[in-house]
Image: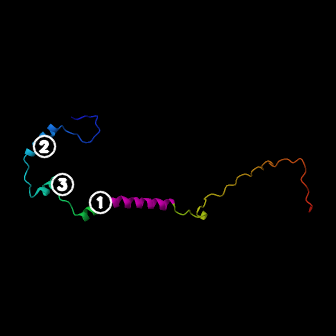
């Protein structure tokens, strides 16, 4: 009998059940092979529609792949041209008003460390 705890992939039947199944399947009538069997199966699988030739199918799929490729390239190229364009020369930036002068800065405090000994005098002076 079938044991769900068994991890084997094949379900073994008892010998009496297996022989009854085999004899029952052997007594079933089999249909005669038909000459149009392959075409009937293909028609059922394809819903009766005809397939286009492989070059037409390839071109159709290629077209759907090339459209986003071309659009992406055009957008990327336009963005790259916009971002990486050369900067204009400074002469092109002309101000319409005169240059404003800022007040002079106050001198910075002396940040040099205070020396306890006077600096040595140079011999040349």
CA gap between label 1 and label 3 equals 19 Å
**Counting other residues with Cα less than 10 Å from the Cα at mark 2, is it few (<14), some (14-19), or many (20 or more)?**
few
Label 2 secondary element? helix
Give me the residue at 15% from left, 52% from top: 44
| Residue 76, quarter of the rendered image | bottom left
Looking at marks 1 and 3 on the same chain, the residue that comes earlier in the sequence is marked by 3
- The magenta stretch spans residue 98: no
Disc marking residue 61: 1
Q: Which residue is at the front of the view, 76 or 45?
A: 45
Question: In front of the other: label 1 or label 2?
Answer: 2
x 20%, y 60%: residue:
51
SS state under label 1 = helix
Q: Crowdedness of circle 1 by 10 Å Cα count: few (<14), some, many (20+)?
A: few
Give the image location of residue 85, x and y in percent. 52, 62
- Label 3 belongs to which residue? 46
Please state, as top left, top right, bottom left or bottom right, where the C terminus lies in the image: bottom right
Q: Residues within 10 Å of mark 3 (few under 14, many from 20)?
A: few
Which numbered marker is on residue 22?
2
Between residue 87 and residue 40, name the one nearer to us.
40
Q: CA distance from mark 3 to mark 2?
A: 35 Å
Q: Main secondary structure of the magenta part?
A: helix
Determine the CA span between mark 1 and mark 2: 49 Å
Magenta-drawn segment: 60-83
Rendered residue at 83%/47% (across/down): 113
Q: Is residue 68 magenta?
A: yes
């Amino acid at each position: 009998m079938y044991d769900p705890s068994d991890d084997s992939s094949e379900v073994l039947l008892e010998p009496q059940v297996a022989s009854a199944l085999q004899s029952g399947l052997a007594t079933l009538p089999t249909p005669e092979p038909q000459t149009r069997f392959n075409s009937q199966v293909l028609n059922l699988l394809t819903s009766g529609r005809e397939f286009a030739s492989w070059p037409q199918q390839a071109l159709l799929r290629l077209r759907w792949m090339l459209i986003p490729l071309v659009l992406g390239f055009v957008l990327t190229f336009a963005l790259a041209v916009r971002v990486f364009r050369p900067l204009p020369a400074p002469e092109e930036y002309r101000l319409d008003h005169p240059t404003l002068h800022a007040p002079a800065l106050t001198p910075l405090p002396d940040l040099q460390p205070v020396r306890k000994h006077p600096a040595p005098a140079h011999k040349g002076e």
